[in-house]
Image: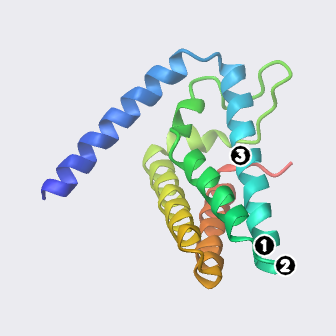
Amino acid sequence: MKKITIASMLGVVALSLAVNASAQVKPEDQIRYRQAAYSFTSWNMGKIKANIDGTYDAAQVKAAANAIAAVANSGLGALFGPGTDKAIGSQKTAVKPELFTNGAEVAKLAGNFAKAANELAAAADKGDAAAVKAAFGETGKTCKACHDQFKARN
């Protein structure tokens, strides 16, 4: 019971920090920053995939996995503030408006991504290529789950 209470309190604190942070960043910058974060994540996922499919470099995989975990735990929710559900000036977005009305589902998906990314980083830290491959697959599934629900197809 104590763990649930602590987790709930941390969630409330994180949400309030995210709301405050989004209020300090212009909506067009929120779109730009979140796109940069996801591009950076994609690039690092690609590096891990290349290592899994080719010559495995444990140091490179560990660095990429840690970068993914850092993004997953960075408070990306702050970059989905009011007004960022549509293009602003030259900043386009592929986010579906439903993302902004399904907070519980979005929180669940974001939590799944962070958990999977943390497990990927832990596997990479151990240097076990088979464990990394499995954790990589799970991390990719969390990305796909969110894209399937909340990313518009262009």
Q: Residue at x 63, y 23 (%)?
A: 83
- Secondary element under disc 1, as helix, strand or loop, is helix
Check the picture and name the quadrant holding the N terminus: bottom left
Please indicate whether residue 76 sits to the left or right of residue 11 in the image. Answer: right
Q: CA distance from mark 2 to mark 1?
A: 5 Å
Q: Is residue 30 or residue 125 the one in the foreground? A: 125
Q: Nearer the viewer, mark 1 or mark 3?
A: 1
Q: Residue at x 84, y 78 (%)?
A: 54
Q: Position of residue 20 (x, y in %)?
A: 44, 20
Q: Position of residue 16 (x, y in %)?
A: 37, 28
* Label 2 with label 1: CB-CB less than 8 Å: yes
Q: Is residue 44 or residue 106 the one in the foreground? A: 44
* Label 1 with label 3: CB-CB less than 8 Å: no
Q: Residue at x 59, y 31 (%)?
A: 79
Q: Position of residue 152 (x, y in %)?
A: 76, 48
What crowding class fits label 1: few (fewer than 14 Cα within 10 Å), some (14-19), or many (20 or more)? Answer: some
Q: Which mark is residue 51?
A: 1
Q: Which mark is residue 38?
A: 3
- Secondary element under disc 3, as helix, strand or loop, is helix
The kind of residue tagged 1 is: Asn
Q: CA distance from mark 1 to mark 3?
A: 20 Å
The kind of residue tagged 2 is: Gly
- Secondary element under disc 2, as helix, strand or loop, is loop
Residue bearing the label numbered 2: 54
